[in-house]
Amino acid sequence: MALKGDRHELETDISFFMNETGVRGQFVSISTGGSGSAMDDSTALVTVAATASGSYAIGCLLNDVVNIDLTRQHLNWHKDEVQKGSKVTLLKRGFIVTDQLEPGASPSAGKLAYLGAAGQVASARSGSSNAKYSDVIGQFLGTKDADGYVKIEVGIHVDEPATED
């Protein structure tokens, strides 16, 4: 389990497809496809951010994206699974409790949360200190518990905040 039920979804987006597998609690970014509004365009796919450098998070994945043979079994609706290539639900604003932290991440309450490698959450910015705020995904609301979960206030911003602290 990568995302606990203890969450509040203030703003979600259901206008993107995902053409690779992923787990709830990961952050995703836009691929290079699509132009204009790109609604229902299969080339405007969402992808799990492979690296924090140059990736712009657009939301937290709220579905498990699986690649299974649908002629032999069905999706697990209790886990809110969707088939690879389908539309996904992305959290833009709210809070979540997730274990999708970068190895070695040490979150503390009040500090900014950053987009890390493979869509995970990092406790420190990777790259130069002059980087834009495109990699800020929210704010930690506590520290890791015994199971490795942490509460995060997600805030995917369109504009740049005035200061980091």
Image (spheres, rainbow, N blue to C red):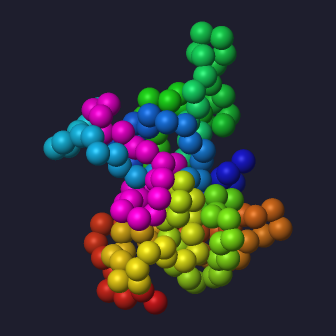
For residue 49: magenta? yes
Residue 45 in percent (x, y) is at 36, 39
Left or right of 11? Residue 96 is right
Residue 70 in percent (x, y) is at 58, 15
Vertical position of residue 28 compared to residue 21: above or below: below
Judging depth in this view, the residue of 143 and 50 nearest the camera is 50
For residue 147: magenta? no
Q: Which residues are magenta?
A: 41-61
Q: Identify the residue at the far left of this view.
A: 36
Residue 10 makes an appearance in the image: no
Left or right of 8? Residue 50 is left
Q: How many numbered discs, if any?
A: 0
- Identify the residue at horizontal 63%, vertical 19% (top origin): 74
- Identify the residue at horizontal 18%, vertical 42% (top origin): 35
- Identify the residue at horizontal 56%, vertical 42% (top origin): 22
Judging depth in this view, the residue of 164 and 49 nearest the camera is 49
Residue 120 makes an appearance in the image: yes
Vertical position of residue 144 compared to residue 128: above or below: above
Residue 65 in percent (x, y) is at 56, 36
Left or right of 100? Residue 164 is left
Looking at the rendering, which quadrant does residue 66 occupy? top right
Q: Identify the residue at the far top of this view.
A: 71
